[in-house]
Amino acid sequence: MARSPWGGRFLSAGFRGAAGVAVVVLAAAAAPGQGPGLVPNGDVAKGNATAAEAQAVATPGAHPLQPALELAQKGLSQLRSTIRDYSCTMVKRERIDGKLKDAEYVFAKIRHEPFSVYLYFLAPDDVKGQEVIWVDGQNEGNMLAHAGSGVRAMVGTVTLKPDGALAMQGNRYPVTEIGVENLAKRLVEVAEHDKQFGECEVNFFPAAKVNGRICTCVQVVHPVPRRNFRFHLARVFIDDEYLIPIRYEAYDWPQEPGGQPLLMEEYTYMNVKVNNGFTDADFDTKNTSYKFTATK
């Protein structure tokens, strides 16, 4: 349904299949003939709602995306009014230059006002310990980062443009677009855009699960490739308690008739803990819990 911000690596470093980190588990139904199941690791999805039941939420005569748009708008409004900050473990997989990367993992602290990001890379060992800080309106718009180990760690803290070539290497989106609020905004924007057109199939799957959290999964399919559409199949999992999107998947059209859709990107926000009371110190390189040095 939308671009899905994650933020990510710097200095070309990422996670390549983090062993021992919590595995995302999804359980929901996929309508027959509508692409991969809702379990991302290749398992067979167990059904908990039929397509007919899912489509029953639509209002006769309304665009199929209208219920999804209303849900996204409601969630965005609630998020802005009730969630000041949150911590989480983020997981992403992205297709870069035609190649689908392995899952990558990072711990994050995010504050909404002013928009502030702290990232700590979890695995594998060659990147463990990397840290990134970006705060809107500070450091001339740059992010501050350091490597976790090896020769690159000897350089210490460096200043990087979030959308510069070095920071963007191996990433689809800059750190400035990270977080569930940015994701929710993109979902609303793209749903409003796609409502202008037909050729859209929408299904709701209740009682889906992401890492134990009960969610409503909204699946959108554009059967035929069109210039107006950004994806063939997309799913967003909206947490039933917080009404925030905690997982997003987007697939391109199959490369050959009858083939499987190609996963372009997926992002999951796990272990979300809201309203921690983060202060400026949580997004300060001088925080003694962090390992930043004087900037270069």
Image (tube, rainbow, N blue to C red):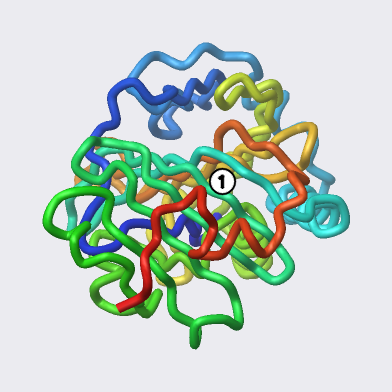
Name, please, the residue furthest toward the left: 151
At which x and y percent is residue 39?
44, 23
Report the quarter where the N terminus lies.
Answer: bottom right
10 Å crowding of disc 1: few (<14), some (14-19), many (20+): many
Q: Residue at x 56, y 14 (%)?
A: 47
At which x and y percent is residue 130?
33, 51
At which x and y percent is residue 165?
25, 76
Q: Based on the displayed image, in which of its 4 quarters is residue 158 positioned?
A: bottom left
Q: Amino acid at mark 1?
A: Val
Report the quarter where the C terminus lies.
Answer: bottom left
Left or right position of 244 against 259: right
Q: Residue at x 69, y 21 (%)?
A: 207
- Whether residue 195 is visible to the viewer of this picture, yes or no, is no
What secondary structure is marked by label 1? Answer: strand
Image vertical order of residue 110 relative to residue 102, above or below? below
- Whether residue 113 is visible to the viewer of this picture, yes or no, is yes
Image vertical order of residue 104 relative to residue 183, above or below? above
Q: Residue at x 70, y 25 (%)?
A: 206
Comparing 3 with 69, the one in front is 3
At which x and y percent is residue 294?
37, 72
Comparing 22 with 134, the one in front is 134
Left or right position of 249 against 9: right
Which residue was labeled with disc 1?
Answer: 220
Q: Residue at x 78, y 39 (%)?
A: 242
